[in-house]
Image: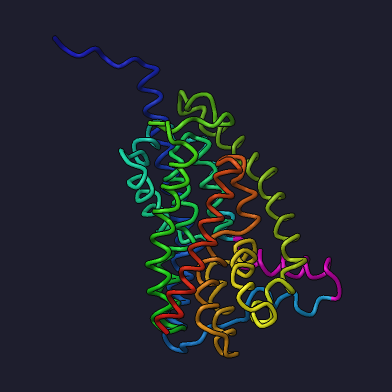
């Protein structure tokens, strides 16, 4: 007996899904080539010739500010000058994930039988996009809103800055090889292990991921629906998420000067400073690779490798603005738990780097 012909509605939905995925892939390839891949090729070429990082740490942008408000403004303008391309691509991609890609297809790609498997998939998906934690946040939040597994979404969010292959190359070109080795090993354990553990702790009884309430009720039913859905999603991300992000970056910038005096804190507080530095660095915000000039300056000033190891993980992995952007989608308990794992992993990285140096 012949199989029944698919209904017209099913054909329309499938066609809309195929076109939605195609649009997403175009945005990813073209956007990342423009914002990340080509600039990083140029950066690698420059570093291979000089062996020294070109430019100061982002925290120096507000060093001479006359007031906290001026410091916040100087820091925010310097930061957005560094990340605006990646942020634009992130918002376009996040809206496409939210509005154009069928939920079942996302689950097919990201759902695995084990939480570790889901974390591995999320971590692998993060490596080509090479975004800082803040630019990865809209995409991670969009994936979670569409019901993707928490472990995969967390691994994607943390994996973008921590497992960025370009930054690993930068580390090899600018700093001793131990920094890249520790980043890769500890970062890999953080991305896979922390994501799986957070999901296990907070969703122990769930065999399949749940749909977050703010997710769209249905996928697109026809190709004609795609433009309107995408524009609504893009407007929501632009109007709500971007201003929230900018305000958070401004607030962090107001206090980033004194908080980023890591060597001074360590000198004054001794062993107590180790945990404090890990917590503060996890909250501060840097662009992609922004931890490298900070570590290089501290190393040149005679700071120990242990301090550099802490900043190697804590500075790029998360930030307060990034956590605020994903908090509603992931849930605040999962967000805070992930931050706690980042702090712990940074301490492990500091100990490992101190032992290897």
Q: Is residue 309 left or right of residue 6?
A: right
Residue with the most extreme front position = 271
Location of residue 5 with respect to 39 vertically, above or below: above
- Occupied quadrant, residue 61: bottom right
What is the x, y in percent for residue 9?
40, 17
Please name the colour scheme applied to the rendered image. Answer: rainbow
Residue with the most extreme right position = 66
Which secondary structure dominates the residues rendered in magenta?
A: helix
Location of residue 215 with respect to 116 vertically, above or below: above
Indicate the quadrant containing the C terminus: top left, top right, bottom left or bottom right: bottom left
Q: Residue at x 74, y 54 (%)?
A: 247
Q: Residue at x 55, y 86 (%)?
A: 299
Residue with the most extreme left position = 1
Say which of 18 and 216 sits in front. Answer: 216
Q: Is residue 112 left or right of residue 225?
A: left
What is the x, y in percent for residue 15?
38, 29
Q: Is residue 210 magenta?
A: no
Q: Is residue 71 left or right of residue 245?
A: right
Say which of 238 and 161 sits in front. Answer: 161
Q: Residue at x 59, y 46 (%)?
A: 326
What is the x, y in percent for residue 210?
47, 30
- Occupied quadrant, residue 330: top right
Q: Is residue 223 left or right of residue 109?
A: right
Q: What number of labels is visible?
A: 0
Say which of 237 and 8 sits in front. Answer: 237
Residue range of the region highlighted in magenta in the rendering: 66-84
Say which of 322 and 234 sits in front. Answer: 322
What is the x, y in percent for residue 298?
59, 84
Indicate the quadrant containing the N terminus: top left, top right, bottom left or bottom right: top left
């Amino acid at each position: 007996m012949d199989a029944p012909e698919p209904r017209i509605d099913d054909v329309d939905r499938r066609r809309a899904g195929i076109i939605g995925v195609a649009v997403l892939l175009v945005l990813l390839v073209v956007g990342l080539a423009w914002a990340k891949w080509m600039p990083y090729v140029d950066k690698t070429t420059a570093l291979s010739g000089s062996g020294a990082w070109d430019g100061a740490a982002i925290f120096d942008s507000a060093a001479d500010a006359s007031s906290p408000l001026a410091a916040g403004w100087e820091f925010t303008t310097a930061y957005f000058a560094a990340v605006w391309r990646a942020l634009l691509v992130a918002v376009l991609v996040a809206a496409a994930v939210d509005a154009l890609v069928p939920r079942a297809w996302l689950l097919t790609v990201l759902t695995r039988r084990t939480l570790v498997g889901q974390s591995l998939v999320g971590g692998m998906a993060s490596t080509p996009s090479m975004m800082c934690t803040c630019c990865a946040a809209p995409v991670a939040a969009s994936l979670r809103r569409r019901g993707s597994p928490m472990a995969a979404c967390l691994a994607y969010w943390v994996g973008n800055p921590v497992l960025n292959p370009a930054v690993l190359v930068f580390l090899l070109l600018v700093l001793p090889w131990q920094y890249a080795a520790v980043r890769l090993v500890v970062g890999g354990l953080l991305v896979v292990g922390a994501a799986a553990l957070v999901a296990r702790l907070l969703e122990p009884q769930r065999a399949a991921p749940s749909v977050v309430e703010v997710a769209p009720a249905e996928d697109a039913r026809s190709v004609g629906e795609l433009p309107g859905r995408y524009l609504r999603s893009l407007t929501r991300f632009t109007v709500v998420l971007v201003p929230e992000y900018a305000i958070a970056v401004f607030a962090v910038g107001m206090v980033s000067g004194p908080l980023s005096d890591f060597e001074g804190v360590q000198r004054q507080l001794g062993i107590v400073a180790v945990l404090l530095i890990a917590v503060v660095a996890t909250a501060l915000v840097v662009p992609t690779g922004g931890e490298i000039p900070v570590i290089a300056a501290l190393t040149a000033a005679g700071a120990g490798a242990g301090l550099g190891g802490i900043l190697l993980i804590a500075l790029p992995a998360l930030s307060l603005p990034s956590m605020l952007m994903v908090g509603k989608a992931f849930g605040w308990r999962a967000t805070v738990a992930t931050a706690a794992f980042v702090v712990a992993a940074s301490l492990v990285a500091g100990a490992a780097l101190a032992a290897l140096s």
